[in-house]
Image: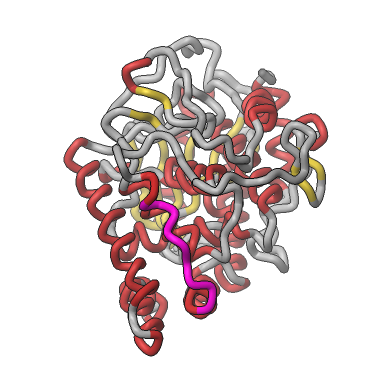
């Protein structure tokens, strides 16, 4: 595992490159490690030295409820699904990052970086959905402050809060700042509104930058014009606008947990999708039938809860089919990007199971689904099942009703587009 200083050098190089708008708004151009070391060959991905393999005729994933494996492999009509994917692409183009969104957020970021760096010696970087380019139009910006001063660990929040409140009361402030507050959450942060964008400011959140780099590695591996990122945007939109099941602070799914679940679908189905809508369909089908009471999700495969604290995974697929990510790739990414928050933290702490268990690909003792309450697990599973059933109508509804059904499925998202 790398030291915090080594990893900060790597990840901050990536973060610097993303404070400026880029012509491809889903592209984050970071090349911070030797890709040959983690098993990525540009243009092709090799598992065990074999670039081509014969897929088994029966797709059989592990971790599902009994007798549900055959129901997650329903064949799609290529003609009607192509029509649906084209309409979905129109929706994604309306909600994914674009030049006006990028310019506005980049200006807010630059303003806050300048403001905070005048308070004390530090560096300020964005992490999360903004630099990854997977944010929704009304999503917040996450930034984190790094400094070598141990004394500032106790005082940084007060100093940042004071300077923001000064800006709030100043008539000459460059941007309109309001609602400055100190949030005493699991991760302490300052939250404020800048030009009506919610900004969360945290301290020394190196893990957030490492996660950003890991997800970028995955997106470049999957390729297909950023299919992974476009799928994240679509699935986040469905979870947020249509089902209201996204948001760790409400006892629902955290963004990183959702991204990990999306990646699991790419992994198990080996990146064989016609487009983001199919990814959403497979996502809803699979996780509505996943046995959440008995298994945790990990990229290494389902982990029986009964085996904890031993995190030993079953194979994601019991049919022996090829998957997207090799064990070499997963272990290497974990080695390169895994960083523990502090020397004082017990790095041997066991994984603690809750109700919606998602194992962090970079820290196997970190439960990304710990925010989900027992009652909300039922709500999430019901939303997944209902969404899968509604999308399945596209497979057998009259062709003339196809686009109407799809527009109805994303009704709230389209309404949000109209009100932007």
Q: Is residue 227 left or right of residue 344?
A: right
Whether the magenta-drawn stretch holds residue 76 is answered as yes
Q: Is residue 46 left or right of residue 130?
A: right
Q: Quadrant of residue 273?
A: bottom right
Classify 297 as above or below 393.
above
- Between 375 and 400, the one lying in front of the other is 400
Q: Quadrant of residue 106?
A: bottom right
Q: Which residue is drawn at the image coordinates 34% and 53% (left, top)?
A: 179
Residue 44 percent coordinates (x, y): 78, 48
How many marks the image carries: the answer is 0
Q: Which residue is drawn at the image coordinates 69% and 20% (left, top)?
A: 2
Residue 147 percent coordinates (x, y): 62, 28
Farthest-out residue, front: 57
Classify 220 as above or below 65.
below
The N terminus, quarter of image: top right
Classify 274 as above or below 128.
below
Q: Which residue is drawn at the image coordinates 55% and 12% (left, top)?
A: 343
Q: Quadrant of residue 56?
A: top right
- Between 375 and 124, the one lying in front of the other is 375
Residue 170 in view: no
Classify 368 as above or below 52.
above
The C terminus, quarter of image: bottom left
Write the start and end of the magenta stretch as one range: 71-79
Residue 252 percent coordinates (x, y): 29, 44
Whether the magenta-drawn stretch holds residue 312 is answered as no
Residue 236 percent coordinates (x, y): 42, 57
- Between 118 and 13, the one lying in front of the other is 13
Q: Which residue is drawn at the image coordinates 52% and 22% (left, top)?
A: 341
Residue 315 in view: yes
């Amino acid at each position: 595992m790398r030291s915090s200083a080594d990893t900060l050098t790597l990840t901050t190089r990536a973060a610097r490159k993303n404070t400026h708008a880029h012509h491809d708004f889903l592209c984050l151009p970071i090349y911070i490690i030797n890709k040959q070391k983690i098993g990525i060959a540009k243009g092709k991905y090799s598992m065990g030295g074999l670039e081509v393999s014969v897929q088994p005729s029966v797709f059989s994933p592990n971790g599902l409820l009994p007798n549900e494996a055959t129901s997650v492999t329903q064949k799609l009509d290529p003609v009607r699904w192509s029509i649906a994917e084209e309409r979905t692409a129109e929706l994604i183009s309306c909600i994914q990052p674009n030049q006006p969104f990028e310019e506005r957020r980049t200006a807010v970021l630059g303003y806050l970086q300048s403001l905070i760096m005048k308070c004390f010696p530090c560096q300020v970087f964005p992490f999360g959905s903004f630099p990854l380019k997977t944010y929704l139009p009304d999503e917040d910006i996450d930034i984190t402050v790094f400094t070598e001063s141990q004394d500032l660990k106790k005082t940084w929040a007060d100093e940042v809060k004071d300077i923001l409140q000064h800006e709030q009361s100043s008539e000459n402030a460059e941007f309109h700042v309001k609602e400055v507050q100190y949030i005493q959450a699991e991760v302490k942060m300052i939250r404020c509104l800048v030009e009506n964008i919610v900004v969360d400011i945290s301290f020394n959140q190196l893990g957030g930058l490492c996660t950003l780099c890991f997800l970028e590695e995955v997106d470049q591996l999957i390729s297909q014009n950023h299919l992974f990122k476009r799928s994240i945007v679509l699935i986040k939109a469905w979870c947020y606008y249509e089902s209201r099941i996204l948001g760790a602070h409400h006892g629902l799914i955290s963004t990183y947990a959702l991204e990990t679940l999306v990646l699991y679908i790419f992994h198990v189905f080996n990146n064989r999708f016609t487009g983001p809508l199919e990814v959403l369909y497979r996502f809803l089908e699979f996780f509505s039938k996943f046995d959440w009471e008995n298994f945790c999700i990990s990229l290494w495969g389902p982990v029986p809860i009964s085996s904890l604290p031993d995190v030993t995974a079953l194979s994601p697929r019991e049919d022996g089919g090829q998957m997207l990510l090799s064990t070499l790739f997963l272990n290497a990414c974990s080695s390169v990007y895994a960083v523990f928050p502090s020397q004082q933290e017990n790095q041997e702490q066991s994984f603690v199971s809750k109700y919606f268990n998602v194992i962090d690909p970079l820290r196997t003792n970190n439960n990304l689904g710990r925010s989900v309450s027992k009652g909300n697990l039922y709500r999430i599973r019901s939303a997944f099942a209902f969404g899968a059933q509604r999308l399945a109508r596209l497979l057998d509804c009259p062709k003339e009703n196809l686009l109407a059904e799809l527009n109805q499925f994303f009704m709230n998202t389209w309404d949000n587009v109209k009100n932007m």
